[in-house]
Amino acid sequence: NTSIWINGTEVTLFNSSTNWSYSYNLSEGINNISVTSRDAAGNESSAITATIEYDPNIYVDEANVTGTEDGTKTHPFNTITEGIEIVASGKSVMVAEGTYNEQLIINKGITLQGAGKESTLISGFEYSGNLITITADDVTISGFTIDGKSATDMGIYSDSSSAIEISDKFCAKSPDLS
């Protein structure tokens, strides 16, 4: 018999040479994982160690034009919409400085965090209608300037959502407030 151990805990036992797999729940932050094997006599292999950083937040940078996008810090999405679509409820979309020409629908409780109102702009000059529509509870928006083309449409619109927080690092502009 041979067994596989992860961080000192036996995770699987098998009788012959075989492939194996194991699902391991990572914690947020840095995870150090050490894998060893033991034979029936108790002989243990040298450890194979890996350090894995788990960051459940999603990253966006409109300047990423490499074609490689997965929402990580290294390969951020280049639209906020992509970030909103994939982020888990209760987590954050971290938006780098830049100008984002898009309309957003926030349909789950998330934090939308810009790099700062001086450097992160959501512009709606190409669109009619609301720039940000919120259809979920527990939404936080911070660190953006919202700049639309119409004084009759809303920069941010929510009909029946609750627990919406728009922080003091937020600035909204419209044509009649120049």
Image (cartoon, rainbow, N blue to C red):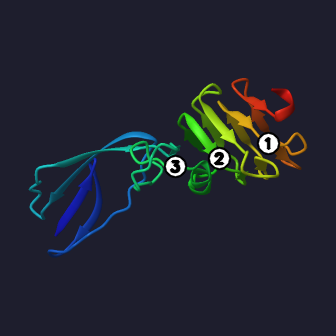
Relative to 123, does residue 10 appear above or below in the rendering?
below
In this figure, which residue is indicated by the disc labeled 1? 149
Asked if residue 123 lies left or right of residue 6, the reply is right
Asked if residue 144 lies left or right of residue 33, the reply is right
Chain-order first, disc 3 or disc 1? 3
In this figure, which residue is indicated by the disc labeled 2? 101
Nearer to the camera, 32 or 146? 146
Crowdedness near tag 3: few (<14), some (14–19) or many (≥20) residues, C-alpha within 10 Å: many
Q: Are marks 2 and 3 in contact (CB under 8 Å)?
A: no
Marks 3, 1: nearer the viewer: 1
Nearer to the camera, 152 or 141? 152
Asked if residue 141 lies left or right of residue 164, the reply is left
Q: Amino acid at mark 1?
A: Lys
Picture quadrant of residue 3: bottom left
Asked if residue 94 lies left or right of residue 151, the reply is left
**Residue drawn at point x = 61 percent, y = 57 percent:** 85
**Residue drawn at point x = 75 percent, y = 52 percent:** 127
Give the spatial CA distance, label 2 vs label 3: 11 Å
Q: Amino acid at mark 2?
A: Asn
In this figure, which residue is indicated by the disc labeled 3? 78
Residue 62 percent across, percent down from the top left? 52, 44
Residue 26 percent across, percent down from the top left? 42, 49
Q: Amino acid at mark 3?
A: Asn
